[in-house]
Amino acid sequence: MAEVLKSVGFGLTRVLVMVVVFLNVVLVRGYIHRHTFVTEATPVTRLCKRHNIITVNGLFPGPTLHVRNGDTLIVQVYNRAKYNVTIHWHGVRQFRTGWSDGPEFITQCPIRPGGSYTYKFTITGQEGTLWWHAHSSWLRATVYGALIIYPRIGTFYPFTTPHRETIILLGEWWNRNPIDVVNQATRTGAAPNVSDAFLINGQPGDLYPCSRRDTFFTSIYNGETQMLRIVNAALNTELFFTIANHKMTVVAVDAGYTKPFRTKYVMLGPGQTTDVIIRGSRSRRGSYYMAARAYSSAQGVPFDNTTTTAILRYATQRTPPVMPILPPYNDTRTATYFSRGLRSLGDREHPVFVPKTVSENLFFTVGLGLLNCPRNRRCGGPNGTRFAASMNNFSFVLPSSSSILQAHYFRQNGVFTTDFPDNPPVRFDYTAQNVSRSLWSPVKATKVKVLKFNTAVQVILQGTNIFAAENHPIHLHGYDFYIVGEGFGNYNPRTDPQNFNLIDPPQRNTVAVPVNGWAAIRFVADNPGAWLMHCHLDVHITWGLAMVFLVENGPSYWTSIEPPPRDLPRC
Ligand SMILES: *[C@@H]1O[C@H](CO)[C@@H](O)[C@H](O)[C@H]1NC(C)=O
Ligand SMILES: *[C@@H]1O[C@H](CO)[C@@H](O)[C@H](O)[C@H]1NC(C)=O
Ligand SMILES: *[C@@H]1O[C@H](CO)[C@@H](O)[C@H](O)[C@H]1NC(C)=O
Ligand SMILES: *[C@@H]1O[C@H](CO)[C@@H](O)[C@H](O)[C@H]1NC(C)=O
Ligand SMILES: *[C@@H]1O[C@H](CO)[C@@H](O)[C@H](O)[C@H]1NC(C)=O
Ligand SMILES: *[C@@H]1O[C@H](CO)[C@@H](O)[C@H](O)[C@H]1NC(C)=O
Ligand SMILES: *[C@@H]1O[C@H](CO)[C@@H](O)[C@H](O)[C@H]1NC(C)=O
Ligand SMILES: [Cu+2]
């Protein structure tokens, strides 16, 4: 009897211990996911031609990572490609783990051909769809994949769990090596060639030559709900997305839940994600195209005017799919209707923490420019100039001898200066039709803005009408921010704040700043490190549309950046 009681007691203790361990691992620390990424040249055939592209593990698009909020990812990257590479975990907060953020020469030196580096980070308080991509030259044209973050075990979506989930990765394709495309542009100073196709999950779709056989499709049953996790992984193009005869209900953007918002069109800037739910009609049959094409807001600037499609298919019917009507390429009204319809969910489990007052009030112009060519050489840009882009008139130059974070941590001088201005050096009518030519040429520099730990920051991102006004998708690393307002024309500091949404503004990591307009973002600088803020059109970051926030450590170990990993690449 005693034996039996003892063994029952022992069994109970063991079960209790296991439960405690389980709770600790799963609820508190989360699972640890280990992955190996090998970057290498891989042959693929698109648009009737065979190409070698750089992939991860031979896959295009790259592997999808599935994790839960609270989990840790350890990804060892081996670079077997002939280019420097780094991987960025787009939208992941990287709290205290800036060494794993990835942008080359910002938080690390590149992983050279033959080298390797291990990224290690924990997902904290983010749920929904993010993605990963190369952050070195234009490699992200083909080196990207989805990062799906489910709720913690024991917690659920704040909406009825859909019957099915489908990833929709929107991509951009050149019939050339994208590195050759950007290198040619950098050499000549001209705008890089526009792409030849857009892709859905790596496939151009039925409207392009030699592509019909591989068009991506997803099934849907009558009455079924399906979540589409849409990612704009395109390099240089903002995209409209729609589905024939099906309305979408937006439930999350950039891994943050939103109030349900029904819409026919979604607009995504590169870097942005949108989770939508669609419902299969009870009676419908046949097939319907999902389609994406450019939202190109800059007047008179060439763009890729093609349309990518995938198929939404009921049962096994193989009727020709119904084509939706897409907005015109310059339909700013539709883009604005969409961005202004987004609200944070803001329920008890997902509260909104938008700073009500701010102590750093920053005003950054974002836009293009033209530089004269050196030594009276004639460049390939307009009238023999070369293209540039800037924030507050500084055209960001990547360091090459070290990364900003390494230089900061190891106190190396001469890599950057800390005088990035809080305001544009010259005030002018930013959105006028006739911005004086004397203002068109920015200055090349590597400047950062230092922020004290825990500062409440507001940045007004003001588009300019230099060369061409354009909607710029501005992405901030290391943070999610609230978009408290946006508008057209010049920001008015007296009247515009009266209309800010400080109740339930959308929270994102990338804001599409309206063409010839502005956007106001707020965040609390609680994550120490070197955080790039840049236009996510790679053509613009190549021209210098970027800056860096250097956020100082807080008062304790837990508010300071972790020490650098031992395998951190050196320059
Ligand atoms: C860019 O386009 C021009 C004109 O079509 C072509 O001559 C050139 O080879 C292209 N460059 C690249 C790198 O694709
Ligand atoms: C884009 O292509 C469509 C046909 O698909 C054509 O009607 C339209 O004129 C083109 N627009 C531009 C700006 O090239
Ligand atoms: C869009 O472009 C077309 C020509 O391609 C032009 O007729 C129309 O006015 C433009 N619409 C807007 C809103 O700019
Ligand atoms: C190029 O020069 C011509 C003639 O001087 C001028 O009309 C045009 O505006 C210039 N274009 C740019 C982009 O500077
Ligand atoms: C631009 O045009 C406006 C209105 O025509 C004029 O008042 C202003 O002086 C012009 N600015 C420049 C820099 O030419
Ligand atoms: C940018 O700086 C250059 C060099 O000082 C100057 O010529 C230009 O007018 C400035 N432009 C703006 C928009 O501040
Ligand atoms: C690769 O990275 C190293 C620094 O680690 C740098 O010196 C070199 O210029 C880079 N190569 C290219 C092609 O950018
Ligand atoms: Cu841009």
Image (cartoon, rainbow, N blue to C red):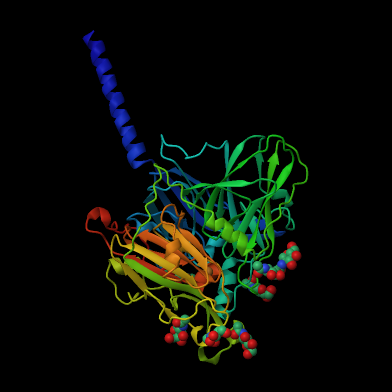
In the foreground, 250 or 440: 250
Q: Position of residue 544 (x, y in %)?
A: 48, 74
Q: Is residue 541 left or right of residue 52?
A: left
Residue closest to the eye, 63 or 352: 352
Residue 273 vertical position relative to residue 177 in the rendered view, above or below = above
Nearest to the observer: residue 99 or residue 560: 560
Horizontally, residue 260 falls left or right of residue 527, namely: right
- Residue 486 point in image, percent of width and height: 49, 64
Whether residue 485 appears in this view of the structure is yes
Q: Residue 364: percent from the left, percent from the top?
A: 43, 72
| Image quarter where ligand 7 lies | bottom left
Depicted 259 relative to depicted 392: above or below: above
Residue 414 screen position, x and y as percent: 32, 77
State which quadrant residue 469 falls in.
bottom right
Please state which of residues 537 and 172 is positioned toward the viewer in this rendering.
537
Q: Residue at x 58, y 38 (%)?
A: 164
Residue 238 position (above or below residue 249): below
Please state the total of marks drawn on the protein image: 0
Answer left or right for 321 relative to 227. right
Q: Residue furthest right?
A: 319
Name the quadrant containing residue 71: top left
Q: Quadrant of the N terminus?
A: top left
Confirm whether residue 53 shows in the render: no
Query: Compared to 182, does 335 lie above or below?
Result: above
| Residue shown at the point (23%, 55%) measured from the top left | 557
